[in-house]
Image (spheres, helix red, strand yellow):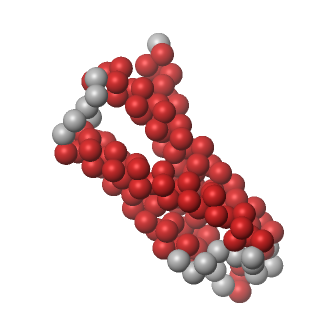
Amino acid sequence: MIFAILKAVHLLALAFGAAASLGNIYLLLARGPHDLPAPALTNALRKWYRLTALGAILALWITGVLLTVMRYGWGSGFAFEAKLAMATVLLALIGFLNWMSPGWARRGGPPSYVPKLHMVGAAALLLAIVFAVFAFN
């Protein structure tokens, strides 16, 4: 029973993380004159996507470690280690963005490299999923 609950939370966190990643990419692509009338909405969405991503990655880490240990012991192999590496990149990236974002908001917006970080985050998420499929097939 506990395993099923952990797995459900893990899968929901994966869905929320994917939604946050893709939402940030959609906001990145939506720049332009049509985006200007609603800056408050855009900023609110950025904040909620950022917080959703942080909650999702923390839930993924906690449930992922518990599920792995419960089912396989401590897994090993290239695919598992690559999955952990991608999840670590994603956790570090999301943590950095959440830590720096309030300061950027006070200074008028994020630096120009932030959209690239969102693209790296989306790629790390997709690679983590691919490697998880291979690791736990």
Residue drawn at x 70%, y 59% as measured from the top left: 47
Q: Is residue 135 among the parts visible in the rendering? A: yes
Q: Position of residue 19 (x, y in %)?
A: 55, 53
Q: Position of residue 2 (x, y in %)?
A: 48, 16
**Number of marks present in the image shown:** 0
Which residue is at a point 64% across and 64% down the rendered structure image? 100
Q: Is residue 20 above or below residue 112?
A: above
Residue 63 spot, x, y in % from top left: 47, 31
Residue 80: % across, % down:
26, 41
Residue 50 found in image quarter: bottom right
Q: Between 124 and 16, which is closer to the camera in this rendering?
A: 124
Question: In the shown orientation, is residue 27 left or right of residue 63?
Answer: right
- In the orientation shown, which residue stands out farthest toward the bottom? 33
**Residue 74 left/right relative to 13:** left
User: 125 left or right of 133?
Assistant: right
The quarter of the picture where the C terminus appears is top left
Which residue is nearer to you in this view: 35 or 83?
A: 83
Classify residue 90 by image quadrant: bottom left
Q: Is residue 29 above or below residue 121?
A: below
Tell me if I can see residue 131 in this picture.
no
Residue lying farthest to the left in this orientation: 77
Nearest the camera: 27 or 104?
Answer: 104
Q: At 19% across and 45% down in the image, what residue appears?
A: 78
Question: Up-down: is 83 above or below 47?
Answer: above
